[in-house]
Amino acid sequence: MGGGSLRILLNATLEELQGRGGDIMFYRNWMHLGDERLSFQTLPSTWRRRTQAFLRKACEKLARAWEPTGVRRALLVAARLLYFPHRAASAADLLLSHICFPFPRPRIPLIWSSQGISPAMYYERCGQWSLEDVIFLYRVLGPQAQALLIATESGARHLLRWCPELEAKTHVVPAPVLVPPDIPEMKPSQRDGIIRLLFVGLDPVLKGLPELLDAYEWLRRRHARLQLDIVVRLGDGELRERVWEISELSGAWGLRVHPPLPHKRVLELMREADLFVSPTYADTYAVAAVEAMAHRCAIVISNFDPLPELFPNAEVGFLVAPGDVRGLIERLETVIANLDVLRRFQENARRRYLTVHDPARVRRRLEAVFERVRADARYSRHC
């Protein structure tokens, strides 16, 4: 890497890295990419940072319910901002921030990382922001950054459709997804003949669990040697009653229900699973499905952007329209009834993970962006 070592400051504290959620994963995984040539640092945890983080979450909740457009969008901007102490930048070359935007504006070059812009249906389904709100945020905050780091070509394409003025700043770099190095080459099904399916989703309705249960009940009548593990947070209601009713017949149906588990335990389930199934209605990256690919799981997942880019249809598994139970049954049946297809998808999934998401490959792409931003900043100072 030319130009000497790079010191990257993350817009996160060690305390914040202990939290859960997809966004935190980006910060944690970046931290693991460092060495003597590329170091990642975190911010100090202070009362001001903690207070402003609380206010930020309050602004986000208010923005979801506030009707006047001007007020709601002001709250949306405030919800993206997170306090940044100026003196923390004194020993860093660049600041890297995911989703949250540093405030006050740092004195070092800023790279703002995000998923880009998703299709309108994603925002309609989640009900938090509208597509217009997200476009507004990029138009306000995007020009403040020296570079935009977008995780998928799809997210960048949708972003530049609405904000073409940001094209020169936009760089596509997949997320580094870390998994244990000792991924087994064989699945338990190759010994005992039981095909294992896995579903992971804290919001079971949003992630399509009801549709998967419909499909699984049909498939289980045709294929006795099936097992479905679901890792889910079940509230009260009909879905909970249905899941527990089926699980009580576990000897007949092969369904195992797990509450939200530590990440290490979820990865252990992926080691055993043959198929990772996610008929989701809303997702911007599906990190769990990428982790499953790393563990040689074939993938059956929804067909909206950016998922076809991450999980190519008929290469690592199959895509299915959200809510299409018949289509889900047909695609699962194709894989379950044809072991040659299943094994090919599994090997392709592992190969795709190594090609796209392997941390060493992602790091090289990140380094290229970091070097370019640092070089541009030096050029600007000398002009």
Image (tube, helix red, strand yellow):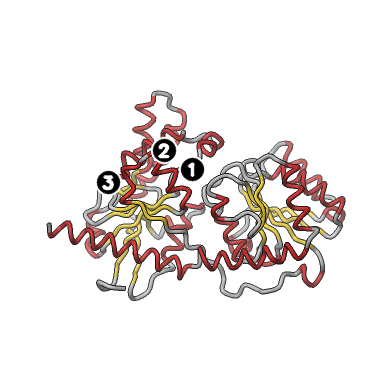
Q: Amino acid at mark 2?
A: Val
Q: Position of residue 329 (x, y in %)?
A: 76, 47
**Quarter of the view holding residue 287:** bottom right
**Horizontal arrangement in the rendering, residue 200 relative to residue 61 (left or right):** right
Circle on res. 118: 1
Label of residue 134 in the image: 2
On the rendered image, what quadrant is the C terminus found in? bottom left
The reply to whether the C-beta atoms of the residues labelled 3 and 1 are less than 8 Å apart is no
> What is the residue that sits farthest to the left in this orientation?
383
Q: Is residue 268 left or right of residue 147?
A: right
For badge 1, the amino acid type reads Ser
Q: What residue would you read off at disc 3?
A: 144
For marks 3 and 1, the one nearer the N-term is 1
Q: Is residue 210 above or below residue 353?
A: above
Q: Position of residue 102 (x, y in %)?
A: 31, 49
Q: Secondary structure at mark 3?
A: helix
> Tag 1, which secondary structure?
loop
In primary-sequence order, the first of circles 2 and 1 is 1
Q: The N terminus appears in which quarter of the rendering?
A: bottom left
Near mark 3 (Cα within 10 A), the count class, few <14, some 14-19 or many ≥20, is some
Nearer to us of marks 2 and 1 is: 1
How many angstroms separate mark 2 from mark 3 (CA)? 16 Å
Residue 112 percent across, percent down from the top left? 35, 51
Label 2 close to label 1 by CB (< 8 Å): yes
Q: Which mark is residue 229?
A: none
